[in-house]
Amino acid sequence: MNQTFTVQGMTCGHCEKAVTTAIKTLDPDAQVSIDRAQNRVEVTTEQARETVAAAIREEGYEVVS
Amino acid sequence: MNQTFTVQGMTCGHCEKAVTTAIKTLDPDAQVSIDRAQNRVEVTTEQARETVAAAIREEGYEVVS
């Protein structure tokens, strides 16, 4: 299931890695692609969207949509 | 020995941690204080200034002065 999130606050490569790691901790089989300039996080996972969003928020980032 | 560096590119807490960890890897007894808004890194260490600067650069940040 492809999910796209708009995420504010990712300022650097460490942030991308933190978000990626959080999602992959939730689902080791998840595919994660981040376009930081566009504040876009694309995830392929069977996890519920709200569960993925919560994992991103827990890292300190705002999930706008 | 107190050293103060002006460092560009630290955008978030992960960056502060990366710089701190790099310096403490060099010298576990180092004291590191970072004021990100001021681009300022203050270090207390017996390591040579250029050695500390190199460790910061290796993390991908620009040591301006």
Image (cartoon, coloured by chain):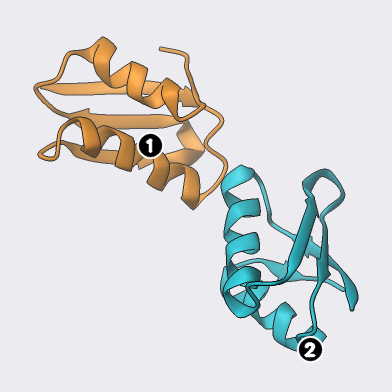
Chain colours: A orange, B cyan
Q: Do the residues marked 1 and 2 share a common chain?
A: no
- The one nearer the camera, A44 or B54, is B54
Residue tagged 1: A19
Quadrant in the rendering for residue A1: top left
> At label 1, which amino acid type do we have?
Val
- Residue beneath the point at 23% across and 37% down: A25
Using the rendered view, name the quadrant where residue A20 is placed.
top left
Vertical relation: B20 (above or below) A4: below
Say what secondary structure mark 1 lies in. helix
The mark total stands at: 2
Task: Give the vertical position of B11 relative to B56 (above or below).
Answer: above
Depth check, front residue: A6 or A13: A13
Question: Which label was assigned to residue A8?
Answer: none
In the picture shown, does residue B56 fall above or below A8? Answer: below
Which chain letter goes with mark 2? B
| Percent coordinates x, y for residue A45 in the rendering | 13, 27
Q: Which residue is found at the position 69% from the left and 72% from the top?
A: B29
Mark 2 crowdedness (10 Å alpha carbons): few <14, some 14-19, many ≥20: few
Label 2 sits on residue: B48
Taking the spot 89% from the left edge, 79% from the top edge, the residue there is B1
Q: Residue B2 appears at what percent x and percent y?
A: 90, 73
The percent position of residue B49, horizontal first and vertical second, equals 81, 84
* Amino acid on which the number 2 mark rests in the picture: Ala
